[in-house]
Image (cartoon, rainbow, N blue to C red):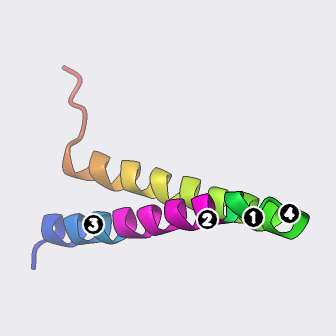
Amino acid sequence: MDSNTKIERQIKELIAEHKLLHEQIEGLELKNNAFEILNIKRLKKRKLIIKDKISYLESLLHPDIIA
């Protein structure tokens, strides 16, 4: 398996995790209590980290070439 295939697989896994976190956050936002607010903040932070990882991996696959 070449490095691009590994990166693409990682991206797919991260996208799936990002989607799952989004769904969990939406469910918790409906409950709207103090404990859930802390949980939501934690999940949103994790979601942002995943988004950054996805962006980084995509940049490895498709680097910007400035000439």
CB contact under 8 Å: marks 1 and 2: yes
The residue labelled by disc 2 is 27
- In the rendered image of this protein, does residue 63 appear above or below residue 22? above
The residue labelled by disc 3 is 12
Amino acid at circle 3: Lys
Image spot of residue 43 (x, y percent): 65, 64
Locate the C terminus and report the quarter of the image it occupies: top left
* Main secondary-structure element of the magenta-colored stretch: helix
Task: Pick whichever of labels 4 and 3 is earlier in the sequence.
Answer: 3
Range covered by the magenta-colored residues = 14-27
The residue labelled by disc 1 is 31
Q: Is residue 10 magenta?
A: no
Q: Is residue 19 left or right of residue 47?
A: left
Residue at left offset 64%, top offset 56%: 44
Q: Is residue 46 left or right of residue 6?
A: right
Element type at mark 1: helix
